[in-house]
Image (cartoon, rainbow, N blue to C red):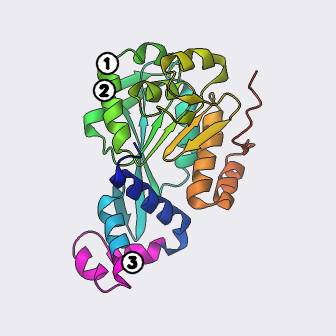
Amino acid sequence: MWNNQRNRQRAQYLLLFGLLRPIRSVLGSLIGGFTGTRNKISKCGSPSLRRAVWLAATRAPKIIYRGGIIMTDFNIILFDDFETLDAFGPAEIIGIMPETYKLDYFSLHGGTVTSSQNIRVATHPFSDMNPEGILLIPGGLGTRALVNNAEFIHELNTIAHQAVFVLTVCTGSALLAKTGVLDGRPATSNKMAFEWVQSVNTKVNWVKQARWVVDGNCYTSSGVSAGMDMTLGFVGDLHGQDIAKRIANDIEYIWNSNKDFDPFTP
């Protein structure tokens, strides 16, 4: 994935916008949508700054300007028998920032998807997804069959290679590993299913002790609630630790913020 120079640039610009959030309104006012963007940017700063702003506007993950605020698509993949908290724990955290992220739910062919806990969710088909956003893949019992679904893995591979960041929770990392995206890279997964996940792709450098692992634009977490820890870590990386801690406090969640230690590792 990181062999794609364009993906590296998109990730860098998204990270820039996250870490420099206080100037977002200034950039939004400067750009003011794509109409006349070149003319407005041409009046701004040095050539290198103008190029950075232009690339951010045209090559970053889908950005929506609303009242000077930059928004990014946050795409959550669902499938039958996904683990509810794997998806909706991170959704709770990301959903607290509606001015920054646009949440949506997708499955291979769209329609209603049912979790292991019998939660029914309406989804859009993969074909409706803007792939140049942030992708989250939950785990759950459904991953056991899905790793052998050639159509799903092919489509996931295509989407993952275009996403600016890919986050997996629990055995969602097995699905991503099956695409080959994680080959030669460190990753982790649910410790109760660790041996099975390892067997899906032995080319991945599986890290058993970690609560979550970050490698380039890929974030992989351990099981279930670890997805919330990882997502708070992701928010902290892009927006600052104070924002992540404030969100954890707002949802009354005790954040396991040490990504290198999973208390549930046997």
Quadrant of the rendered image containing residue 124: top left
How packed is label 1: few (under 14 Cα within 10 Å), some, or many (20 or more)? few
Q: What residue sits 61% from the left and 15% below the top?
A: 195
Q: Position of residue 96 (x, y in %)?
A: 56, 51
What's the amino acid at mark 1? Ala
Q: Which mark is residue 49?
A: 3
Mark with earlier residue (1, 3): 3
Per the image, label 2 sits on a secondary structure element best described as helix
**Residue highlighted by disc 2:** 154
Q: Is residue 219 magenta?
A: no
The amino acid type found where label 3 is placed reads: Leu
Q: Nearer the viewer, residue 193 or 48?
A: 48
Badge 2: residue crowd in 10 Å (few <14, some 14–19, many ≥20)? few
Q: Which residue is mark 1?
A: 150
Q: Which residues are magenta?
A: 24-50
Q: Position of residue 156 (x, y in %)?
A: 35, 31
> What is the x, y in percent for residue 37?
26, 74
Does residue 128 lie above or below 177 as drawn? below
